Amino acid sequence: MRLTKQKKLILDIRNNSHEHLSAESIYNECRKVLPNISLGTVYRNLNLLSEQGLIKKFKIVGDNERFDKTVIM
C-alpha cells in the first residue's frame, strides 16, 4: 500500500486524537489541511487503513462507525 498524503493525514489525525472519531470528524479535520479532499476519499482510505490493520473500525449501537488507534504492544 502506498502512503499517499491523504492516507498520512488521516493516520495523523486518527493517531493524534484521544477520541473515537467518526469518518465525518476526520473529514472535517482533513479539510483544514486539504480543502479539496472528498468525504468519499476519507471513507475509502479509512477502510483501506482498517483492512491493513493500521487503524481499528468499530460500530457503536445507534451511531456511525468510529475509528480508533491500533495498540501495538
Image (spheres, helix red, strand yellow):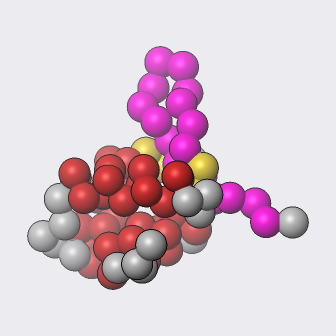
Displayed quadrant of residue 72: bottom right
Total label count? 0
Q: Is residue 69 visible?
A: yes
Q: Residue at x 17, y 59 (%)?
A: 38
Whether 4 is among the magenta residues is no
The residue positioned 52% from the left and 52% from the top of the image is: 51
Range shown magenta: 57-72
Hey, which residue is sitting farthest right in the picture? 73
What quarter of the picture does the C terminus occupy? bottom right
Q: Position of residue 25 (x, y in %)?
A: 37, 52
Residue at 43% x, 56% y: name it.
48
| Vertical comparison of 64 with 37: above or below | above
> From the viewer's perspective, is residue 2 above or below residue 70?
below
Q: Position of residue 57 (x, y in %)?
A: 55, 44
Vertical position of residue 58 compared to residue 49: above or below = above
Q: Is residue 17 visible?
A: no
> As rendered, which of 23 and 47 lies closer to the eye?
47
Q: Is residue 43 left or right of residue 73?
A: left
Q: Quadrant of the N terminus?
A: bottom left
Which residue is situated farthest in the top direction here? 62
Residue drawn at 55 percent across, 27 percent down: 60
Q: Residue furthest left?
A: 36
Q: Within the magenta stretch, is there residue 62?
A: yes
x, y (%) of residue 19? Answer: 58, 52
**65 to the left or right of 34:** right
| Residue 32: percent from left, percent from top | 26, 72
